[in-house]
Image (tube, rainbow, N blue to C red):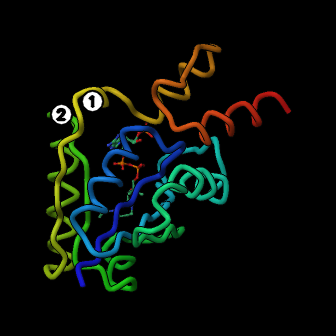
């Protein structure tokens, strides 16, 4: 069984992430969506809020084999614990490539049994990132083009309560 990890902070999940998740589900037998803590980042949403948003955004895919889990520590260790042989990463452009290349090489060095699979985004989603979405929302502009409905609702709840 081909098990893959797709990890990120998902603060919040965007349509770009969702596109990578849906396409990965068509490639692997099981996808573990790892909600990680990047020690260099400050988060708007708690891990549980981020997990809930992903869960709700994937409710039409409940017949597909995925799990959403929080993780700390190294990605390769998480992959190992989950019996995953693949790490899925999205590359949106040359700036992502530098970082992804470094991380992929480090992961390969740490565990050579785990392969990194790179997926290209759909063109519409190339410029979207979680920070862009948060910035647009901060200035009270519409983010509905960039995020799934449950994420939009979570923003409304957070800023109107
Ligand atoms: N669509 C939209 N946005 C995307 C995207 C896509 N397909 N792919 C990446 N992004 C965005 C993310 O939203 C994030 O945006 P932000 O910086 O505005 O928040 C940015 O690109 C970077 O994404 P990513 O590289 O996945 O970072 P992350 O912070 O979301 O998650 C971890 C990083 C947790 C997966 C990573 O730090 C990790 O694996 N940590 C464990 C430690 C480890 O093993 N390190 C490697 C070996 S040293």
- Residue drawn 62% across and 42% down? 150
Secondary element at tag 2: loop
The residue indicated by pointer 2 is: 93
For the residues labelled 2 and 1, the Cα–Cα distance comes to 7 Å
Q: Position of residue 93 (x, y in %)?
A: 18, 33
Q: Looking at the image, is 144 positioned above or below residue 112?
A: above
The residue indicated by pointer 1 is: 126
Whether label 2 touches label 1, CB < 8 Å:
yes
Q: Is residue 139 left or right of residue 23?
A: right
Q: Looking at the image, is 70 positioned above or below residue 17?
A: below
- Residue drawn 30% across and 74% down? 76
Secondary element at tag 1: loop
Q: Position of residue 69 (x, y in %)?
A: 52, 70
Q: Is residue 116 left or right of residue 68?
A: left
Q: Quadrant of the C terminus?
A: top right
Q: Is residue 35 left or right of residue 29?
A: right
Q: Position of residue 52 (x, y in %)?
A: 63, 56
């Amino acid at each position: 069984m081909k098990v893959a990890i797709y990890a990120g902070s998902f603060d919040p999940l965007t349509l770009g992430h969702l596109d990578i998740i849906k396409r990965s589900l068509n490639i692997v037998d099981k996808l573990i969506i790892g909600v990680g803590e990047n020690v260099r980042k400050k988060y708007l949403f708690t891990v549980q809020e981020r997990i809930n948003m992903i869960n709700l955004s994937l409710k039409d895919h409940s017949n597909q084999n995925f799990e959403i889990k929080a993780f700390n520590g190294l990605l390769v260790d998480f992959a190992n614990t989950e019996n995953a042989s693949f790490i899925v990463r999205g590359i949106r452009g040359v700036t992502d490539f530098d970082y992804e290349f470094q991380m992929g090489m480090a992961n390969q060095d740490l565990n050579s049994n785990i392969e990194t699979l790179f997926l290209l985004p759909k063109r519409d989603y190339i410029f979207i990132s979680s920070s862009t979405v948060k910035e647009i929302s901060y200035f009270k502009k519409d983010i509905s083009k960039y995020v799934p409905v449950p994420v939009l609702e979570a923003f409304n709840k957070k800023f109107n309560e």
